[in-house]
Image (cartoon, helix red, strand yellow):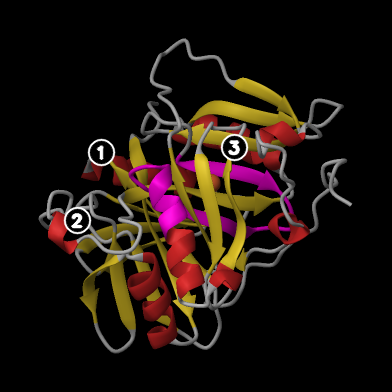
Amino acid sequence: MMPPNIVRIGHAIFTVTDLARSRHFYVDLLGLNVLHENRDAIYLRGIEDREWTLKLELASSARVRQIGFKVASEADLDALQQLAQDEGLLHRWESEQDRPRMLRVQDHWGIPLAFYFQSQRYPWLLQSFDRHRGAGIQRVDHVNVFTPQVDAMSRWYQKALAFRLTEVSEDKDGRAWGAWLHRKGNVHDIAITNGTGPRMHHFAYWVPDASRISQMCDILAGAHAAAHIERGPGRHGISNAFFLYVRDPDGHRTEYYTADYLTVDPDFEPIRWSVDDPRRQQLWGGIAPKSWFTEGSDVESFDGGVVEQQEPLLGLPAYIK
Ligand SMILES: [Fe+2]
C-alpha cells in the first residue's frame, strides 16, 4: 500500500500560562501576525502563511498539545487512520479553528501529531509590506523533537510516512544521534534529536534573510528582552541555515531560520556527520549552551496529562562539558 501523502509541516499548538504575556512576545516583539483571537487562544501566522500556523492556548501549564502536518487529500487522512489502527496507535478525529476534519495520532514514541487537509485559507500578507512588523517572519518551516530512540523513530517516519532523510548525525558506533527528514523539498519538516523524550525541542519559522535575524536580536535587546535569546545568531553546518533560537516566556523554544537548500532530487544522498564534530551545529565554531541539549517542552497525552518521558541511551557530544 502507498504511504499517505504528507505535504509539509502545518502548525503547532502550545499551551501557555499567561496569554497576554505570550501575545506581547510573539506579536509585539517577534512580529508574528494575529489571524484569530479570543479570550483563551491566539492563532498566529507568518506573512506567507495562508492559514494559522501557531496557536497559543491558555492553560495552567506550558506544554505542546499537538504538531500538525498538512496532507494532500481527505483520502490521505483515511489512509492515516487505517495506519494508526493497523499499528495500534492512539488516534481520534478532532476539529480545530478553520480545520473541520483533523486526525490526532500519538506516534510510537509519544509525539502528539495532527493531520489535516481542509483548512480555511486567508489572503497572505507577503506583499502587504506596510503590514510587516518585527522580523517579517515568513512561513512555518519545521519542528524538532527529542526522543531516546532516534534510529527507530527515523526509520518509521521514512517507511510508514514516506519522509526522506537529508542529513544525519551519528556517534562513533554509527548510531543515529539526530535525523533531519523532509516532505516539502527543503532540509526538513521534522528533525529527531537524541534526548529525554518525548518532548518538543523547537518549532521553526522561515525568515526572508539573515538581516531579519539581526533585526530580531536588536528588537529584543531594545525591549530589554535579550535574555530570551538562547543561541545564535549563527550558521548551522547541518542544513547550512542561518539561525536564531529564542525561548518564550513559558520556555517554549522557537527558531528563526533561513537559507537552507533544495532536496527534491530523487537520487539525493543524505549528508552524514559525526555527532562529535562541532561544525555540524555551528560552522563558525560557537558551542551551543548545555540548555540546548537538555531542555525542551513537555508534550500532552490523549488524556490531557503529559506523555511519560524516558532518558536517552546515547550521551551528549564529546565537546559539551
Ligand atoms: Fe531547527
> In x, y percent, where is residue 103?
35, 56
Label number found at residue 119: 2
User: From which residue to which does the magenta span run?
Assistant: 189-215
Can you tell which quarter of the image residue 35 is in?
bottom left
Say whether residue 101 is left or right of residue 231.
left
Residue 212 drawn in magenta = yes
Label number found at residue 72: 1
> In x, y percent, where is residue 238?
60, 32
Can you tell which quarter of the image residue 97 is in?
bottom left
Label number found at residue 236: 3
Q: Nearer the viewer, mark 3 or mark 1?
A: 3
| Helix, strand or loop under label 1 | loop
> In x, y percent, where is residue 194?
72, 46
| Helix, strand or loop under label 3 | loop
Say whether residue 77 is left or right of residue 18.
left
Residue 67 drawn in magenta = no
Above or below, 59 against 248 in this view is: below
**Amino acid type, mark 3:** His
Residue at the spot x=69%, y=67% of the render?
A: 308
| Helix, strand or loop under label 2 | loop
